[in-house]
Image (tube, grey):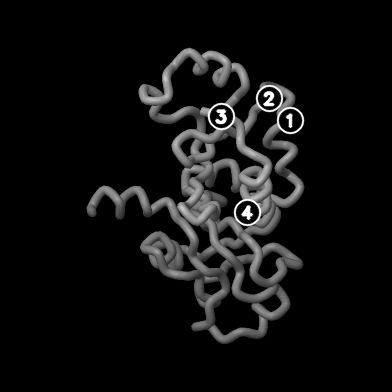
Amino acid sequence: MRPLTEDETKTFFEKLAKYIGKNITQLIDRPDDPHCFRLHKDRVYYVSESLMRRAVCIGRDELIALGACFGKFTKSGQFRLAITALDHLAQYAKYKVWVKPNGEMPFLYGNHVLKAHLGRISDDTPEHTGVVVFNMSDIPLGFGVTAKSTSETRKMDPTAIVAYHQADVGEYIRSIEE
């Protein structure tokens, strides 16, 4: 377990900023307990500093995970967000998409959000930016990337894609079945 290098930090924060914008500072500078990001076996973990200090005495081979996993670095150096970061992304999300009840299951099975399934979308959402997908009861289902901006979305036909699927909470179930 080590701190992220400068290049890793830049790559990670660029990806995170697509979803939560400048709220990254609120993740780290929490008034109740300061948190930090640590790298362990190519995975980035969000850990409270007090827990991190206690885990220093555990060896690398014995340490499996620590805190909330935000994602992992691929072999090519890109960062891929994991569904385990959804609770934190949903809390600080800059742009949000709500799907109707008839669109929840298709999204949870890995399909994109269609205009026919769209319940609401945040105002002034730009094209190709990260969004957190909620159901109409404000329960986070996953996250993705918008296909069009909010103004263009209103003019689209019902079968057009509003948001591209990135990850959803149904991944746990699908990965167990495999």
- Would you say 57 lies left or right of 26 here? left
Label 4 or label 1, whichever lies nearer to me, is 4
Quarter of the view holding residue 6: top right
Q: Could you tell me the amino acid type at mark 1?
A: Asp
User: Which callout, 2 or 3, points to the residue nearer the camera?
Assistant: 3
Q: Which residue is mark 2?
A: 34
Q: CA distance from mark 1 to mark 3?
A: 19 Å
- Return the disc, 4 or 3, that comes first in the chain's sequence: 3
Label 1 sits on residue: 29
Residue matched to label 4: 15
Toward the viewer: 132 or 79? 79
Q: Give coordinates of residue 85: x percent, y percent.
A: 53, 44
Residue type, mark 4 in image:
Lys
* Three-letter code, disc 2: Pro
The answer for how far apart the CA atoms under marks 4 and 2 are is 21 Å
Element at label 3: strand
Relative to 171, is 155 on the left or the right?
right
Q: Are marks 1 and 2 in contact (CB under 8 Å)?
A: yes
Task: Give whichever of discs 1 and 3 has the lower sequence position.
Answer: 3
The mark found on residue 75 in the picture is: none
Among numbered discs 1 and 2, the one appearing first in the sequence: 1
Q: Which residue is mark 3?
A: 2
Q: Nearer the viewer, mark 1 or mark 3?
A: 3
**Which of pointers 4 and 2 indicates the residue nearer the eye?**
4
Label 2, secondary structure: give it: loop
Q: Amino acid at mark 3?
A: Arg
Q: Residue sitting at 56 percent across and 29 percent down?
A: 2
Is the residue marked by circle 4 packed among few (<14), some (14-19), or many (20+) residues within 10 Å?
A: some
Instruction: Name the residue rendered at 74%, 38% in the picture.
Output: 25
Of residue 159 and residue 16, the one placed in the foreground of this image is: 16
